[in-house]
Image (cartoon, grey):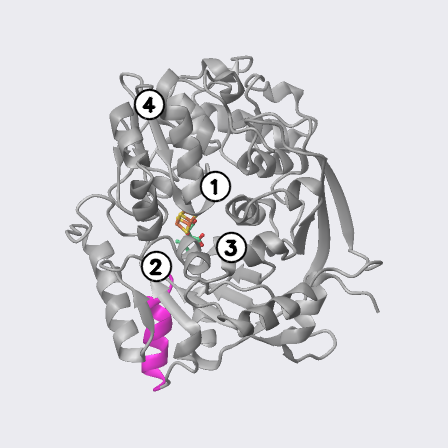
Amino acid sequence: MAKTMFEKIWDNHVIQSEAGKPSIIYIDLHLVHEVTSPQAFEGLRLSGRKVRRPDLTFATMDHNVPTKDRFNITDPISKQQIDTLSKNCADFGIKLFDLDSIDQGVVHVMGPEVGLTHPGKTIVCGDSHTSTHGAFGALAFGIGTSEVEHVLATQCLQQSKAKTLEVRINGRLQPGVTAKDLILGVIAKYGTDFATGYVIEYTGEAIRNLSMEERMTVCNMSIEAGARAGLIAPDQTTFDYLRGREYVPQGEAFDRAVAEWSKLTTDEGAVYDRVVEFDAESLIPQVTWGTSPGMGTDITGVVPNPADFTTENERKAAEKALEYMGLTPGTPMSEIAIDYVFIGSCTNGRIEDLRAAAAVAQGHKVAPNVTAIVVPGSGRVKIQAEKEGLDKIFTEAGFEWRDAGCSMCLAMNPDVLQPGQRCASTSNRNFEGRQGRDGRTHLVSPAMAAAAAVKGRFTDVRDWEFKVKQEA
Ligand SMILES: CC(C)[C@H](C(=O)O)[C@@H](O)C(=O)O
Ligand code: SF4
């Protein structure tokens, strides 16, 4: 019978299944960070267990790491979580990409970069944005701390089989319109729960044309559409990205792996439980105006009027969001002034994201009264960016150049907004207080964030006086 990619990966990993009950599946890769793992390791200690497969378990610290003076962690909780992860990794024999490692960084940037993320793997992490790894055709999803303990102890997980949802992206993205705009546009159109209970597979011409970095941006935000995970079929782009990376099979073994990975693609005639379509061609750069990733619109649009929403719930949510965001209906998005710019995170902290932002920033200056920080997603991204001189472009333009970490994506480290401050952010969540108490977050692409830094307000990067990278 014809199968979808999800069904193939699922069937390859089911150890036990009984009608009406969750199945038990095998986990190929377990990524660990400092925030959701301490109690899990403590649980192992209390029950006298070991980690079942330390060789399939890899850790790094990201959420609590200061992006300036990283070895000097003054917050006691952050320090404790980081020290605890180091101790747990040492005690249980787990490879840790520690603060002094070039591979330390946001866990979802590190995994693919070192080549741990492969097509067809099941990958879990105590972190919702584990969906990022689906860009390689891996079934990757976030789990809770008790499940982290379960996977540490058994390398297995209880899971109910999700339904399948094809999100078909037709046409091509126009110059200046990015993968970030694409996923923001999809979520603005279909809502933050349209994929609840499903694993998304992104298909279509626009997806095939994306680089791995761009695919990761799309899959990263699957969770913001409510999905369990997001998948993209592996292809030559995937294999080219993986070849030669440290934890990828080498030589002939790589070619054999490619032959296996190529079989994962959804079969002709396989049926998804649901299909939605989206037109990439007519998409323009997106900016969110509210406090959920679905509350977004075109840069050429205006702040919506709550009265124009169809249901009472939507009206109330929009009213509440606008009050929190300090915005007035009808204000053009391009007239909203900002105080802060954050370029980074597991959504947009990879090398291509920094290149895109630097291309916009080059030869310009950050507007007075705007603080702009650029935070590479990993130590390796940082070194690569420095090799290419991107750090110089940023600092000459007045951006701060930082060390790797989650940074201002969420307020768990010294990078936080002050109450009332408004931020153009390349991250994935604009919830109340996400970047600091009473901080206001607008989600945008790296190019749009850099342009906003220069103008001091949102601006359409397609009008920028530089050549937006034209697709061949
Ligand atoms: C801290 C962690 C559990 C959380 C997540 O699960 O995603 C964080 O990474 C986030 O982005 O909100
Ligand atoms: S960068 Fe942001 S979204 Fe990604 S893991 Fe860190 S806090 Fe979560």
Judging by the rendered image, the residue that carries numbered circle 3 is 241
Q: Determine if the C-beta at disc 2 is less than 8 A from ligand 1.
A: yes
Q: What secondary structure prevails in the magenta region?
A: helix
Per the image, the residue denoted by label 4 is 339
For marks 4 and 1 on the same chain, the one whose residue lies earlier in the sequence: 4
Q: CA distance from mark 1 to mark 2?
A: 18 Å
Q: Is residue 43 above or below residue 160?
A: below
N-terminal label among 3 and 2: 2
- How far apart are the alpha carbons under marks 3 and 2? 29 Å
Residue type pointed to by label 3? Tyr
Discs 1/3, front: 3
In the rendered structure, find residue 35 and report the number of the disc placed on it. Answer: 2
Which sits earlier in the primary sequence, circle 4 or circle 2? Answer: 2
Q: Position of residue 179 (x, y in %)?
A: 56, 38
Q: Report how far apart the C-alphas of labels 3 and 4 lie in the structure.
A: 37 Å
Q: Is mark 4 within 8 Å of ligand 2?
A: no
Position of 71 relative to 256 (above/below) = above
